Image (cartoon, grey):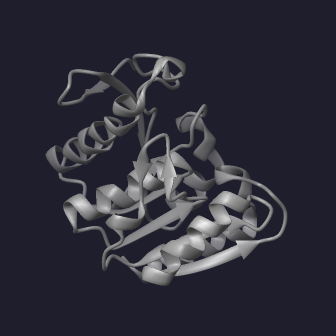
Amino acid sequence: MDERLVTKDDIRISFKQEGEGPAVLLVHMLNSNKESWGPFSGKLHDAGFSTMAIDLRGHGESEQRWTTFGKEDFANMEHDLDAARTYLKEHKVPLVAAVGASIGANHALRLSHRHGKLKGTVLLSPGLEYRGVTAEEFIGETPLLMYASEGDAYSAQSSKTLQARHGTLHILEGDAHGTSMLNDKIMDDIVSWLQEHS
């Protein structure tokens, strides 16, 4: 199926919507794509959630190439998340949570700030700033769960700064980043947390 989302700045965004129930928006990290959420999506479906995974502009099957991007292009990825939210709203699927990795985590946090109606936001390896996309000023009252690896020093320190403002943080051993941190236990813990908050 060649269906695409079209953003407010007219970029065609590839997406995969699966499962039944309220939706969790999945936002991948840099140089990745919507397929990186595969096993985690399955656990969400088993728990009664649907998933909306997008290829951010410049990634996967979406238009443009991220390797040519400047800061404005990375900032404009927010339109990709907004297009996904609009699509779900038009199809009467409630968006209850967002899960993002690395720069996708920053964008997930910013989405929850813009729209204020998410019941939970999960950040995997957020940073105070990735490619000009900042995070700290977008911390709000939405329940917030964060993971970072101690050996991933920038994200670990950024996450501690964010957690000082709001949220729950788990620092893991090793240096895995973003979706690379996901194992069965962490995925199950995130799903349980989302069930509690939605």
Could you tell me which quadrant the C terminus lies in? bottom left
Front residue of 45/30: it is 30
On the image, the x and y values in percent for residue 23 come to 36, 57
**Percent from the top left, x then y, of residue 151?**
80, 62
Horizontal side of residue 102 vs 80, given as left or right = right
The residue lying furthest to the right in this view is 174
Q: Residue 140 at what x, y percent from top left? A: 31, 74
Residue 87 horizontal side relative to residue 176, left or right: left
**Residue 20 is at least partly visible in this image:** yes
Question: Which residue is drawn at the image coordinates 57% and 37% (left, top)?
Answer: 30
Confirm whether residue 19 shows in the render. no
Residue at image x 32%, y 44%?
Answer: 81
Q: Is residue 100 above or below residue 189?
A: above
Q: Give how far across and how far down residue 55 sits, in percent.
A: 46, 32
Question: Is 185 rendered above or below residue 94?
Answer: below
Residue pictured at 54% horizontal, 82% vertical: 168
Quadrant including the N terminus? top left
**Quarter of the rendering containing residue 18:** top left
Q: How many marks?
A: 0
Query: Which residue occupies the foreground of this view, 119 or 113?
Result: 113
- Give the residue at x 36% y 36%: 77
Res 5 quadrant in image: top left
Asked if 140 appears above or below 30 in the picture, the reply is below
